[in-house]
Amino acid sequence: FAPLTQSAMLRSQPCVNINAVLRYTSSTSVRHQRPVNTRSVIKRSGVNASTSPMTDASFLQSLELNEDRFVSLLRNLIGEAEYLQNTGVGTAYVPQEDRAIKHVLEVLAPHRKENGGPLEIDHVTYAEGRGNLIIKYPGTGSSEDVLSFVGSHLDVVPANPDAWKVDPFSLTVDGDKLYGRGTTDCLGHVALMTTLFSQLAELKPELKTTLTCVFIASEEASGPGIGVDGLVAEGRLDHCKPGPVIWVDCADSQPCIGTAGAITWHLTANGHRFHSGLPHKGINAIEMGMEAASRIQQKFYESFPACEKEREYKFITPSTMKPTQVKCAPGGLNQIPPEATISGDIRLTPFYDVAALKACIEAEVAAINADIESLPVRGPCSKYVIRPDDGEPIVGHLKLEWGDHLLTGIACDLTSPAFKLMCDSIQDVKGVAEPYSLTGSLPLVHDMQSEGFDIQLIGFGLMSTYHADNEYCSLNDMKDAARILATLIAKFDLR
C-alpha cells in the first residue's frame, strides 16, 4: 500500500489573513453608543408599530426583544419537549416537530400574508407530524439581495427527569436563567427567531434584502430526507443560495468559524482462547487489539498532525483519534480472551479529507495483518501467532469497521461580507467579538456548504449546558441576541 503524503491529505482552503478579523474589541460600553430611535424600539410592553412602517433598516439597530412574547413562546415550546426528543427513526424517541410548529404559527398568524401581514410562510413536511417551517420577509431588491437564518431545529436530545433538579419538560425561570430541555439547543433559538420575525412584521421596515428564517426537523438524530437535507434536495432553499446563510445553532454568542468531522470506528482483534495458566497456548485478543490501536493512533498523528490553518482558525485542539469503549467475548477471568473490540472516534479538522483519512487507516490495518508479529508483545508468553507441532499456524487477525456516524467538518469563509458584519454587530452589542473553532461537530452544514451555500455559524445558548442535565439559557443573552441579529440585518441591508 503506497503511503499517502500529507499534501495529498491536506485539503486546500482559500488563503486569508485572519489575524485582522479574529478579534474585535471596544473599550467603551456599546450600549451607551448605540443610537436610540424611540419610534422604532419594541420593548417588553409590546409596542405595536404595524400601522407605521419605517423607511429603512437603520432603526433596527435599536430594536429590543419583546421579552414577554419570547418567554411565553419558549414556555409553550418547552412544554412540548417531551414529544420532541429524538434518538432516530425506528428508536424509542421519534419527535413530532409539528407540535412545536403549532406554537410558532400561533405567534406569526397575524403577520401572515394571507392575513394582511408581510410574512410568507411555508410548512413543509416529508414525514407525518415532522414538519419544517420556512418564513420569508420579502425585500424590494433583486434575487441576489438575500440573508437567511437557518438551522434552528425543532427536536431535542432526550432528558431523564430523575437527573434534573427541575422538570426538563416545563420552563423554569430562575432570575436570568431559563431552564428546560431545548432552552440552549435549540428551542431557545426557535423562540428567539420567531419573536424577531414577528417584530419585523409589526415594524414593516422597507428592506431591499429578503430575509428568510428556516426551522428544521430531525437535526439531533438520523432521519434522512426529513429535515434540511430534504429541503435542499427539493430546491426549497435555492433562493437562499445567492446570499449568506447564518446557521443559528451554536453557543456563547460568538461566531463559530470551524468545526470538525466526527468518524466512529471499531477495531476487532481475533485471537485464540486458552486457559490463563497456559498463556503461551493462547492469543490474547485484548493485548493484540490494544497494541494495534496504539500503532494505528501513532500512524494517525504522523499523517494528520496539527497544521497552521488550525491555528489560524483558532481550533481549541487539533485532529484526534482515540478509543472510547472496549468489549470482549464472554468468558472467565482465567481464560485468554479470543476476541476483543476497541471502538472510538476520530475528530478531523476540515483541512483534512475524510476519504484520505479512511484510506490511511485501512492501509495501516492491512499492513499490521500482513505482519501481525511486528506488533509489540506483553511479556515472555505473549504472542500473536501459535505454531503447533501437529497443525497449521493459528494467526491473530484484525478487522476494521467504520461506524454509521459520519459528520464532516466545516471551515467558514472568512472573506464573506456576512462574517465581518456579524463580528461588527457582536462588537456593537457585546463590546468584543472573538471567533472560535472547536472539534465538536455539526450535522448538515458541510453538505450545505458543498451545495454552494455561504454558511456562517453562530448561536446564543450556553456551551456549558449543551445536551446537559439542567440545561438552561440566559435571558440576557437572548435579549442581546435580538440586538445582534437586528443590527446584522441593518448593516447587511445598508452595505
Image (cartoon, rainbow, N blue to C red):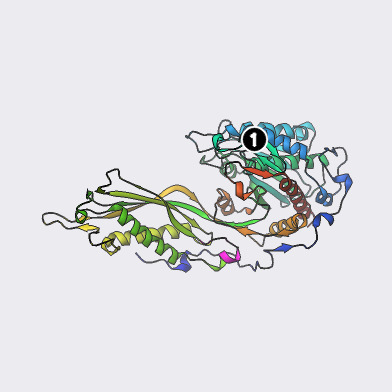
| Label 1 SS | helix
Specify the farthest residue to the left.
390
Residue 122 coordinates in the image, percent (x, y)? 67, 36
Q: Quadrant of residue 29?
A: bottom right
Q: Nearer the viewer, residue 260 or 149?
A: 260
Residue hosting label 1: 78
Residue ID at (55%, 42%): 220
Q: Nearer the viewer, residue 127 or 381?
A: 381
Q: Which residues are magenta?
A: 310-318
Q: Is residue 239 left or right of residue 265?
A: right
Q: Is residue 182 above or below residue 25?
A: above
Of the residues shown, which amino acid type is indicated by label 1? Ile
Q: Nearer the viewer, residue 119 or 380?
A: 380
Q: Is residue 422 above or below residue 178?
A: below
Residue 454 coordinates in the image, percent (x, y)? 64, 54
Prevailing secondary structure of the magenta residues = loop
